[in-house]
Structure formats: structure tokens, C-alpha cells
Image: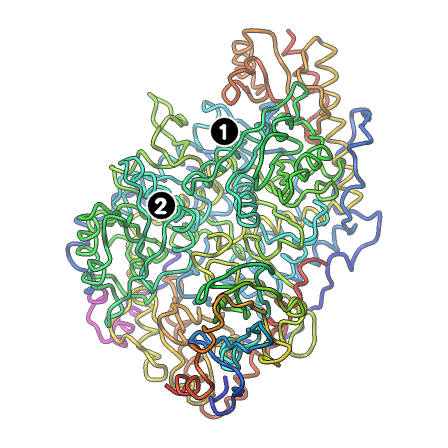
């Protein structure tokens, strides 16, 4: 596990208390887990994602990530309809470790209420919660 | 070091051996003519390799040599009770009248076997202090499931099905998984600062939607749940039941009375306390013991006295039903029966010596390893890697290094409430000299952790293989050759 | 006592090191109200030789071959077990090891289980097999629960021609959570009548057994078509006699999604019904929903081939109440015996032995029929089959017992409509003269 200072948290995203991030992409939001989350989980071996078309509320679980000896549930940072999932993670779950904000993205959500994005933490607030 | 390194044979996979047409089986003489077969239904048969008898013998002999086992080394796995598995038990289980017995023989032709079941049930009732026993569950987890089925059936028969179950945070993961099969939602109960349950914590959570509590006593920290009577009274007052996981029964044989403790249902692990072999992961047996009030719910069939004879009976309308195709792992029951008969009253001495051995190890290691609960333990002691973490050495590294010293590692990272746990259960079988060797090895490792942590990170050095890549195994599962 | 090594001097020295005066002091944490009021009342200890006599006496009351002629199968079969297997299984390194949680010192168990999984997959024609379940009955119950998880549906269809004990275990496992079991009747040929499936909807799975409890080989192609005609429903094929797949097509090659059953026939003594071993296999697509332990291949730090327990996030010790099953162990030693047995026979030997079973039972079937005994079910069989004896057969059955012949299993206890029907079994261990004796005695 790394020190917080060794981890990377882009400023153009917002973060949830459950360590998911969201990024606006036209009228959608891209969702993944933060560098902190992937680092704490360790080597990710499997990502279980929902079917496209699923409608899931903010805060409800949309899947799980697994390391060798742990399972963590994934929670919607913004409620809405899952319109795309990252199928690349089926064969290469390690992308979540190596590029958590890039090719390690998980789902794209069409938001029910785009205003929920503003309720998420910005980079600075998120860093503050991590440092406790 | 109690070991030395020697030649370890490589051995390929079965299908990398052999040649078509070989066999290691003596085909019986054919006395009957071939019968016609419906060609629409037949298939090519399995694609198995063909090996000679000596190829089979060498293959499995070499594989066996890659294992550590109780027969070769001290195997102090906490919560697993890796005691000596007496050889005479194997002889008894393989007697023709036992090993060759068909389970559906008419009762008159299997009276000796019914007697064995009947008597073993009586003895386990006597040992636990509970009234009635079913030997049918095939493993501890199935015993637990049986217990939860009994909880479920009991509340259902009163017309008040319940939805929740209390489970302490020290519990084994099987407890919530077994409860979930009966539709119960697990409600965690935090243990107190002394490492045991506080009655108030249970009182705060217990209500009339809660079926009862599942606990392990002694618990997984190796401590006796001294408040169990008060806990049981709280649970009973709300109409709930108390389930005890008997995984740690090896600590309290001849000492406690489960019914006096307020326990309603208990499962035993014959492969722990009663010396039946673990077999690399089974088969075991998980008998369930209950109070007289709950006896009508036990699985069927049950052996009953019918005049002079013993008989199978299934007409118990409240029974949870059948758990096994026949009567459970009978061959394992035979071994436990043989063990109890071999010890008789000395069974009480088993727990006394198991507890003495654990405390001796606890005393011998507490200078070198962090002991979260510094008080006499029961049959196992729990240390942590806290001091060694300062040198970036983890419980895993300590465990792997013990292999080089000729010991099987203890249980690590369990119970979950203790970070970096090392859970050591020596059992009564080990001599003082072996314990001294073990303590010396652990202390030497503590010194190595300070002086040469890399040696531990790279351990084991003397096993068949170095550390294995579990991430690769899980990312790209290869489960068949 | 020879299992307890402590001398009085040892005990004193150890108490001194611990810093207590007596062993009793170590138990001080146990409140008086939790304690026994009297010592355990157990029979007196027996020395090794007295124990041998006692156990021989108990065992002697059991009817066994060759004194008795026993034509019982019904989920527990008499097959020859090579001495090599008996002796190799007794190796303490296999026998007295625990679950292979420390792979560096458990490669023997791990490679053997990996080989077992592979042989089971090949036998059943399936893509993935687990490290084993308790027995055939609980394997079927777990298969149905798995189908319920995969499909998120709450009803399953179960053939009435599945072993009645297996059906009872399924009920025990499914009833508390309120899952519904639809029973499919058997037809005049002894096979499952699939017609009821046409109106059934929303099924998680259709489960049959083949050969079924009556010994009849199911038409698995028809079962597959009827099952998969409904989108999403899984086809489960159970079995109690895996040797049949040395002759008959493996269920996996006929479209089954989960195949499971009892492996006692594969080198494991009957032992009054247990321990046996539950074989369990499924399609790779459902691998992560599978119950039970799995061994996978990997490499060590130096790149050498090795094996580990894997995909354990499915299991109870990690996923707790959301695990795929509460099972912790497998039937390790029995799975090992099954692997040794399959390897000892090899593909050639397995086919040959299966054929001999078929021919031996077929000989008996023909001889009984020729002697005027009715064979109520017309479907093909393997090594067991049903006969209907003349009315009032119970007396005759009892007379034969007195003559040390167990003429099969009376079916009326399980199927009230099948009075005078008996399930007979003959395997490679049955001698021709005993088969002839049975025909002669039954028809006398």
C-alpha cells in the first residue's frame, strides 16, 4: 500500500465517500474507482458489472471488484441508467489497478438527476477525507 | 532446524504420463455374453490417460511427499485441532462388516452398525450435556446448517417465523453463510474490550424478530465466553435460541455442560475434537446435539430402540428433513467411536493437556510477539504481527518462514477482529520437546525479522515451490488440464 | 494413554513456565455455572487389542458378501477397489494434512485435486468441475440453489425418478427460503415424463437423474430440448452411478448446464452410505456462481508450475452471508480416491468395466424375463433395473433374506403405486452362478 501522497487524484473528477469517481462526458457520466481504492484492494482479479439498461439508484450497489482474498461492492455515485460497461475489464481487470481513471473505467451512466454530480466531493475535499 | 533438505522428485500431471493400452486395474473375468446397446445413447467414454500400476504408485507417492501433515510435523493451525489421528481408527473403519456394508440393508442385517450409531449418539450427548444427537451432517458447515434449519423450524412451528440472527464479530464466515441459507439476516455483535461478548451488547440487539444467536465457545480468540449464561438468558427471554459452534470443543471436554451454559443446539466437528483425519480437506462429520425440547426437529432417519432391536425411524413430523443421501459420513463416525472407546475417562485429560500446551506456547512467545489479550488462553493462543510490521514483516512472512524450520504455519489473518493475527493451536498431542522446538523457531524468526527481513519476504526457501502467484490463478483461471 | 505424551515432570515444568500452580488454574475463566456437576459417564477405555475384538464383534453382525448375495444398488454400489488405492490413500501425508491453505507445503493435495477436477470434467463432458461436495444428494441441492442464484427465479422442476433420498435432501435445502419444487412424473417407460414442462414457466432449472433411480437411462436430448425451450432455464443432470458414462454419452455433451452426483462407485467403499463424494461440474460461463472449493494452475516466483486454491471470493470465509454456499471443505480424501480410481482404470479400462457392468446386469435382466418375471420399464438401463414380482412378493422376499439373499430394494416404501416392484443391481463383482441362483430362487 502506498502513502496518500504517492497516489493520484485528478482535479477534473468528483469523488464519493465510497471511493468511486464520476466524470461528465456529454450528457453521461463515466464511473470508476479511485487510485486510493485500487491501491487498498491490491491486485484486482475480477470485476462484476451490471447489464446495460439497468436502472440503479445513487448509493445502491452496481457490482463488485475482487482481489484474491477480498470482495468490495461498488456503489453508484450518481443514480441513473447504465448505458455502457467496460467489457475490456472482463479479460484485463488489472486495468483498474494500472489506469483507474483511464482504461480502468467501469460504467457510463445516463443520470436521473445530473445535479447529483455537484453533491459529490471535489478533489480537495476527497483528499481531506483520506487524510482524515 | 529440525529438518534438512533432500531430493524432492518432480512429477508430471497424470495425462503427461502413460500410454494408450496400459492399465492399473485387474479387469474381472467375463462370464456373460455382450448384450446389444442402443447406439443413440452411447458415447466415446472418458478421455482418461492409461497408466501402469507402478506409474500410479509412484505418481501418488511422489505427490504425497510434497505435503506437510500431522504424521510428519507439528501442524498448529488455530481452530483446526490438528491432533494425532490414531492408526487403529483406520483399521476399525476398514473392517469388512463396516467398509462393505450397504446402507439399505434390512435392519436385521446391520444391527451392529445401528448399535454403533446409537451408542455414539449417547456418548456425544453425555459429553456435551445435551439431550439428543443426530450424526447425519457430513461436515461442520452442514451441522451448522442443520442447527439453523432447527431454529427456522422451531420458530415456524410456533407460527412466528423470524428473520434475523445475531452473530459475534469473531465468528467464522460459515456462520453467516449457513444462516443465510435459512433466510436469516446476520446482525453482527461486537465483542467487548476483553475479547468476549458483553451481555448488554446482546440485549441491545435481541428482539422478537431475531431467531437467536450463533456463537463459538471458546471463541475464535481462544477465550471462554464467560458471560454466556447471561447472554443465553437474554436471548431466551425474547423467545430466541442459542446455537454454539463446537469447533473449539477440544478445550472443554469434561469441563463444561452445554445445557447448563444455556446452549440449545451445538454442532461438533469429529475431525477436530474426536481425532478423525482431515484428509486434505475432508471428509469430516458434524453431529448436531440439541436439548430435549428441540429433539423432534432433528434430521431423519433416526435410530431408535424397538424392543430388543434397533430400527430406523423417519416419522417425526417436525423434523427438518434429510441432509445426506444415507446417514452421513458413517466411516468417520466409526473413527470417532473408536477414539472415544480408546480414551474412556481420559477424554477429560485431552482438554487439560491441550489447554496446557497452548498456554505454554503463549508464555514462551509473548516476549517476542504482540499478544492482544494477555491472560490465560484456552486451547489456542492468538498473537499478531504488530511488532514485526515495524520491519515490514507480516504474519504471512512469519508463516512462510516457519515452513523452513519444519513446522506447518499457524492460522493467519483470522479472527478478522485482530489485525495480522497468528492463531496457534498445538493440541494435546505434541510433546514438550516439540513445543520447545516450535517456540525456539518462532523466536529465531522474530530475530530474523529485525535483522534480515528480506529472508522472510522470500520464504519459504526449502519447500517444493517458492511463493505462488495467486493473482495469476484468479485472473486467468485454469481449472482443468 | 498412548495419545497423551505428557509426563508428570513435563506438566510441572510447563506449569512453572506458564506461572500457574495447576492445570485447573488455567480453567479459572470458566464460571462455575457453566461447568459439569459430575465427570463424564463414558465406557471404560479399551486397549488396542480389546478394541479390535469389540469392533470385530460389532462388524460381524453385518450382512456382507460373499456369505450373503446382495443385489442392492440404489445409490451405493459394489465395485472392486484396487489394493493400490487402499494403500496409497493411507499415506499419512495425504491422510493427516489439512485443507491446502499453504500451497508451498500442500502441492501434493493441490495437484491431486487439480487432476481430480480434470478427470471429473472429462468424465462428465463438462468445462469446469469443483474439488467435490459432500455427496450426490447435497450436490444436487446445491446445483438447484446455484440455478436459482444464476437465473434469479424461485421455482425448479425435479423429476420424480430422481433418487427419493436426493429429493428429500433437496426439499430440506430449498424449503426454508421458500423456493418451489415442481415434481415431474415418470412415464410408462421408466423415464421422466416431460410433458408437464410445456405449461411450466419461470423455472430456474429442470433436474433429472440419468441413469435414474429406476436404473433407466434418460433421453437427455429430449430433456435438453424441453428445458432450453424456455429461455434461461438451466438443465441439471444428476447421477448416482458415474461408471455409466463409460458406456453412455456424458451429460455435458448433451447440453447439460450443471452435472452433479455421487462418486462412491469410483474406488470408495460403501461404508454404510458414507463418506462418498459429490461430483459437481458446470459450464465455464457459470463458474463464478459455483459452490465449493476450486484448485487452479499457476506458477511460483521462479516460474515453475504449481497449484493453489482459487476463486475463493465465492466462498463463505470471504463473502460470508453472500457466499455461493456455506460449504467449507470438500471430501478431499474421497476425491483423491476417485482420482486414483479413474487414473487406475484409464480410459480403456473404464470403458471395458462399464461394458462388463452393463452386460452382467443385462444377463440377469434377460434371465429373469425368460423365467417369466415382468420388467415394467422399457427404457435402456445400465447396472440396475426394476422387476415386478408376482403379487404377495413380500413373503418371498423375506424367505430369501433368511436364505442370505437380498433380492434388491422394495420400491413400495418410496412409491406406493409400485408394490411388488424391486430395484435389482448387478455389477462386475456379481458372479454368474449367483445371478443364476437369484433367478432360480425368485421364480421358485
Vertical position of residue B103 compared to residue B262: above or below: above
Dot label at residue C262:
none
Residue at the farthest right position:
B20
Classify residue C349 as left or right of residue C374: right
Q: In x, y percent, where is residue C343? A: 72, 50
| Residue C313 forms part of the magenta stretch | no
Q: CA distance from mark 1 to mark 2?
A: 32 Å
User: Which chain is home to disc 2?
Assistant: B
Mark 1: secondary structure: loop
Vertical position of residue C157 compared to residue B288: above or below: above
Residue C110 visible to an observer of this rendering: yes
Q: In x, y percent, where is residue C286? A: 62, 53
Vertical position of residue A100 compared to residue C377: above or below: below
Q: In x, y percent, where is residue C76? A: 58, 34
Name which quarter of the figure residue C177 lies in: top left
State if disc 2 and disc 1 touch (CB < 8 Å). Answer: no
Mark 2: secondary structure: helix
Q: State the residue position of label 1.
A: C62
Q: Observer-nearest residue: C203 or C121? A: C203
Residue extent of the magenta highlight? C7-27
The residue depicted at 70 percent of the width and 8 percent of the height is C372
The 10 Å Cα crowd at callout 2, few under 14, some 14 to 19, many 20 or more, is many
Q: Observer-nearest residue: B124 or B139? A: B139
Name which quarter of the figure residue B420 lies in: bottom left
Q: State the residue position of label 2.
A: B147
Tell which tag, 1 or 2, sits nearer the viewer. 2
Does the magenta stretch mainly form a helix, a strand or a loop? helix
For the residues tagged 1 and 2, is the chain the same? no
Amino acid at each position: 500500500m502506498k502513502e496518500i501522497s504517492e497516489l493520484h487524484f485528478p482535479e477534473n473528477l468528483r469523488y464519493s465517500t465510497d471511493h468511486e469517481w464520476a466524470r461528465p462526458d456529454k450528457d453521461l457520466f463515466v464511473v470508476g474507482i479511485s487510485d486510493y481504492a485500487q491501491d487498498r484492494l491490491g491486485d484486482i482479479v475480477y470485476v462484476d458489472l451490471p447489464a446495460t439498461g439497468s436502472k440503479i439508484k445513487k448509493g445502491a450497489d452496481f457490482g463488485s471488484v475482487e482481489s484474491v482474498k477480498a470482495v468490495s461492492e461498488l456503489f453508484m455515485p450518481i443514480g441513473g441508467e447504465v448505458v455502457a460497461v467496460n467489457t475490456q475489464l472482463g479479460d484485463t481487470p488489472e486495468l483498474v489497478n494500472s489506469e483507474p481513471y483511464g482504461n480502468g473505467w467501469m460504467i457510463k451512466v445516463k443520470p436521473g438527476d445530473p445535479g447529483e454530480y455537484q453533491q459529490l466531493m471535489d478533489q480537495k475535499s476527497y483528499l481531506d477525507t483520506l487524510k482524515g | 532446524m529440525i529438518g534438512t533438505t533432500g531430493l524432492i522428485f518432480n512429477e508430471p500431471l497424470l495425462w503427461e504420463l502413460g500410454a494408450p493400452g496400459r492399465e492399473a486395474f485387474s479387469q474381472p473375468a467375463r462370464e456373460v455374453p455382450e448384450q446389444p446397446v442402443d447406439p443413440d445413447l452411447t458415447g466415446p467414454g472418458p478421455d482418461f490417460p492409461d497408466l501402469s500400476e507402478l506409474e500410479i504408485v509412484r505418481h501418488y507417492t511422489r505427490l504425497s511427499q510434497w505435503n506437510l501433515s500431522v504424521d510428519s510435523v507439528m501442524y498448529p493451525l488455530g481452530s483446526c485441532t490438528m491432533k494425532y489421528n490414531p492408526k487403529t481408527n483406520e483399521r476399525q473403519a476398514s473392517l469388512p462388516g463396516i467398509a462393505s456394508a450397504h446402507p439399505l440393508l434390512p435392519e436385521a442385517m446391520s444391527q451392529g452398525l445401528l448399535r454403533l450409531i446409537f451408542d455414539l449418539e449417547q456418548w456425544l450427548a453425555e459429553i456435551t450435556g445435551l439431550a439428543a444427537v443426530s450424526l447425519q451432517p457430513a461436515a461442520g458447515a452442514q451441522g451448522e446448517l442443520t442447527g439453523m434449519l432447527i431454529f427456522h423450524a422451531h420458530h415456524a412451528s410456533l407460527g412466528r417465523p423470524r428473520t434475523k440472527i445475531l452473530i459475534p464479530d469473531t465468528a467464522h464466515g460459515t456462520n453467516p453463510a449457513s444462516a443465510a441459507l435459512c433466510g436469516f439476516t446476520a446482525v453482527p455483535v461486537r465483542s467487548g474490550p476483553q475479547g468476549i461478548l458483553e451481555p448488554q451488547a446482546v440485549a441491545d440487539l435481541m428482539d422478537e424478530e431475531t431467531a437467536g444467536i450463533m456463537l463459538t465457545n471458546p471463541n475464535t480468540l481462544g477465550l471462554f465466553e464467560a458471560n454466556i449464561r447471561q447472554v443465553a438468558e437474554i436471548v431466551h427471554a425474547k423467545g430466541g435460541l442459542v446455537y454454539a459452534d463446537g469447533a473449539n470443543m477440544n478445550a472443554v471436554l469434561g469441563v463444561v455442560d452445554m445445557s447448563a451454559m444455556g446452549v440449545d443446539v451445538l454442532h461438533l466437528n469429529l475431525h477436530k475434537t474426536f481425532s478423525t483425519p482431515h484428509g486434505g480437506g475432508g471428509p469430516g462429520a458434524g453431529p448436531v446435539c440439541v436439548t430435549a425440547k428441540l429433539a423432534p426437529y432433528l434430521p431423519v432417519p433416526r435410530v431408535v430402540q424397538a424392543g430388543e432391536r434397533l430400527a430406523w425411524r423417519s416419522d417425526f413430523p417436525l423434523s427438518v428433513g434429510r441432509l445426506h443421501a444415507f446417514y452421513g459420513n458413517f466411516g468417520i463416525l466409526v473413527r470417532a467411536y473408536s477414539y472415544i472407546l480408546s480414551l474412556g475417562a481420559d477424554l477429560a485429560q485431552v482438554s487439560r493437556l491441550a489447554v496446557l500446551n497452548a498456554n505454554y506456547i503463549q508464555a514462551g512467545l509473548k516476549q517476542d510477539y504482540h499478544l492482544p489479550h494477555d491472560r490465560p488462553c484456552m486451547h489456542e493462543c492468538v498473537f499478531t504481527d504488530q511488532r514485526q510490521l515495524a520491519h515490514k514483516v507480516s504474519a504471512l512472512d512469519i508463516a512462510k518462514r516457519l515452513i523452513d524450520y519444519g513446522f506447518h504455519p499457524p492460522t493467519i489473518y483470522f479472527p478478522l477482529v485482530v489485525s495480522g493475527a497468528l492463531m496457534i493451536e498445538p493440541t494435546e498431542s505434541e510433546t514438550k520437546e516439540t513445543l520447545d522446538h516450535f517456540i525456539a523457531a518462532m523466536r529465531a524468526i522474530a530475530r530474523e525479522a529485525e535483522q534480515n527481513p528480506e529472508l522472510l519476504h522470500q520464504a519459504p526457501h526449502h519447500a517444493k515451490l517458492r511463493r505462488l502467484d495467486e493473482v495469476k490463478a484468479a485472473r486467468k483461471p485454469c481449472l482443468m488440464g | 494413554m498412548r495419545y497423551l505424551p505428557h509426563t508428570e515432570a513435563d506438566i510441572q515444568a510447563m506449569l512453572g513456565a506458564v506461572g500457574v500452580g495447576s492445570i485447573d488454574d488455567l480453567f479459572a475463566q470458566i464460571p462455575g455455572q457453566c461447568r459439569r456437576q459430575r465427570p463424564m459417564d463414558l465406557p471404560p477405555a479399551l486397549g488396542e487389542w480389546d478394541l479390535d475384538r469389540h469392533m470385530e464383534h460389532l462388524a460381524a453382525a453385518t450382512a456382507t458378501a460373499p456369505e450373503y448375495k446382495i443385489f442392492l444398488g440404489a445409490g451405493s454400489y459394489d465395485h472392486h477397489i484396487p489394493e493400490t488405492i487402499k494403500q496409497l490413500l493411507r499415506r499419512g501425508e495425504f491422510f493427516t494434512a489439512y485443507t491446502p491453505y499453504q500451497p508451498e507445503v500442500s502441492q501434493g493435495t493441490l495437484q491431486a485435486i487439480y487432476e481430480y477436477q480434470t478427470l471429473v470434467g472429462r468424465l462428465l463432458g463438462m468445462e469446469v468441475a469443483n474439488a467435490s461436495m459432500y455427496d450426490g444428494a447435497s450436490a444436487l441441492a446445491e446445483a438447484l440453489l446455484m440455478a436459482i442464484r444464476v437465473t434469479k427465479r424461485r421455482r425448479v422442476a425435479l423429476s420424480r425418478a430422481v433418487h427419493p433420498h436426493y429429493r428429500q435432501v433437496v426439499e430440506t435445502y430449498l424449503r426454508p427460503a421458500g423456493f418451489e419444487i415442481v415434481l415431474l412424473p415418470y412415464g410408462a417407460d421408466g423415464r421422466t415424463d416431460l410433458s408437464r414442462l410445456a405449461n411450466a414457466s419461470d423455472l430456474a432449472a429442470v433436474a433429472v437423474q440419468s441413469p435414474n433411480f429406476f436404473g433407466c437411462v434418460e433421453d437427455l436430448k429430449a430433456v435438453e430440448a424441453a428445458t432450453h425451450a424456455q429461455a434461461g432455464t438451466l438443465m441439471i443432470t444428476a447421477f448416482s452411478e458415474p461408471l455409466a458414462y463409460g458406456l453412455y454419452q456424458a451429460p455435458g455433451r448433451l447440453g447439460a448446464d450443471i452435472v452433479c452426483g455421487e462418486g462412491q462407485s469410483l474406488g470408495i467403499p460403501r461404508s454404510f452410505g458414507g463418506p462418498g463424494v459429490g461430483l459437481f461440474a458446470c459450464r465455464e460461463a457459470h463458474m463464478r456462481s459455483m459452490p465449493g472449493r476450486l484448485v487452479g494452475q499457476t506458477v511460483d516466483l521462479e516460474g515453475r508450475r504449481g497449484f493453489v486454491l482459487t476463486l475463493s471470493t465465492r466462498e463463505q470465509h470471504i463473502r460470508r452471508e453472500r457466499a455461493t454456499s456455506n460449504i467449507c471443505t470438500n471430501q478431499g480424501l474421497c476425491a483423491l480416491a476417485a482420482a486414483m480410481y479413474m487414473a487406475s482404470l484409464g480410459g480403456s479400462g473404464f470403458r471395458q468395466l462399464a461394458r462388463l457392468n452393463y452386460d452382467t446386469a443385462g444377463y440377469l435382466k434377460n434371465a429373469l424375463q425368460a423365467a417369466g418375471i415382468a420388467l415394467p420399464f422399457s427404457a435402456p438401463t445400465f447396472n440396475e433395473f426394476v422387476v415386478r414380482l408376482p403379487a404377495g412378493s413380500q413373503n418371498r422376499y423375506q424367505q430369501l433374506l433368511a436364505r442370505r439373499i437380498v433380492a434388491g430394494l422394495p420400491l413400495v416404501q418410496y412409491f406406493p403405486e409400485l408394490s411388488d416392484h424391486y430395484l435389482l443391481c448387478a455389477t462386475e463383482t456379481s458372479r454368474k452362478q449367483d445371478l443364476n441362483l437369484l433367478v432360480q430362487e425368485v421364480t421358485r
